[in-house]
Amino acid sequence: MTRAGGDPFRVLGLQPRPDLTDDEVHAAWRRIAAATHPDREDGGDPERFAAAAAAYTALRTRFGRGEVLADRSARPAATGSGRRRPVMARWHGQRFAAVARLPARARRGRPARLALRIAVAAAAAAIAVAAAGPHPAAPALATGVATWLALTARRDLAPRDDSPEIRPAKTR
């Protein structure tokens, strides 16, 4: 969030709400900047000014405010040690769980079609690398084929239309 690790809303004296406007954030920034700028005759408060500048950078756009609000709501409860688990650690944990579920998804989906697509992608990558030779574009071609496979294989990992997971429940 900010360099000092504080809450940008608190640093700027704003209530954390999703309907906050750019003008409100800018006005709060200007108020704090005028009071704490290091070029003031009294020397200002450079540390508070830096924290306010970082908070303004984080909150100046609607997207930035949304990211900060999402980070605030995603914070886990403190553990027994009082330390919080970083957001990236939670994301990696979710990714590892998703990777662990891939074999089951492939069995419920279209395993033969997925195997065929993997073989075609491997062959296409091998042909592209052989055609490019020792050129620096060879890894980029292989990466492009792998990206295509990753983006399009979702259909093969999805349950088939006749699987019980997507069959509508019977109503009375």
Image (cartoon, rainbow, N blue to C red):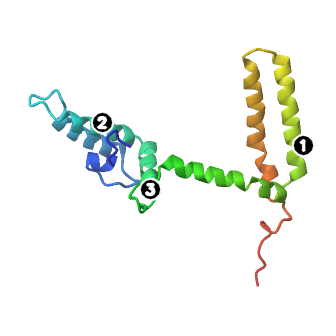
Q: CA distance from mark 1 to mark 3?
A: 42 Å
Q: Position of residue 71 (x, y in %)?
A: 45, 51
- Residue in the foreground of this view, choosing between 109 and 92: 92
Residue 123, picture quadrant:
top right
Q: Residues within 10 Å of mark 2 (few under 14, many from 20)?
A: many
Amino acid type at image mark 2? Ala
Amino acid type at image mark 1? Leu
Q: Where 136 falls versus 76 (above or below)?
A: above
- Could you tell me which residue is drawn at 43 percent across and 43 percent down? 64
Q: Position of residue 138 (x, y in %)?
A: 76, 21
Q: Position of residue 104 (x, y in %)?
A: 78, 58
Mark 3 or mark 2: whose residue is earlier in sequence: 2
Mark 1 or mark 3: whose residue is earlier in sequence: 3
Judging from the image, what secondary structure is the residue with disc 3 in? loop
Judging from the image, what secondary structure is the residue with disc 1 in? helix
Amino acid type at image mark 3? Arg
Judging from the image, what secondary structure is the residue with disc 2 in? helix
Q: How many numbered discs sit on the rendered protein?
A: 3
- Could you tell me which residue is drawn at 38 percent across and 58 percent down? 82
Q: Which residue is mark 1?
A: 116
Q: Which residue is mark 2?
A: 53
- From the viewer's perspective, is the residue at label 1 or at label 2 nearer? 1
Q: CA distance from mark 1 to mark 2?
A: 54 Å
Q: Where 104 falls versus 147 (above or below)?
A: below
Q: Which residue is mark 3?
A: 75
Residue 31, picture quadrant:
top left
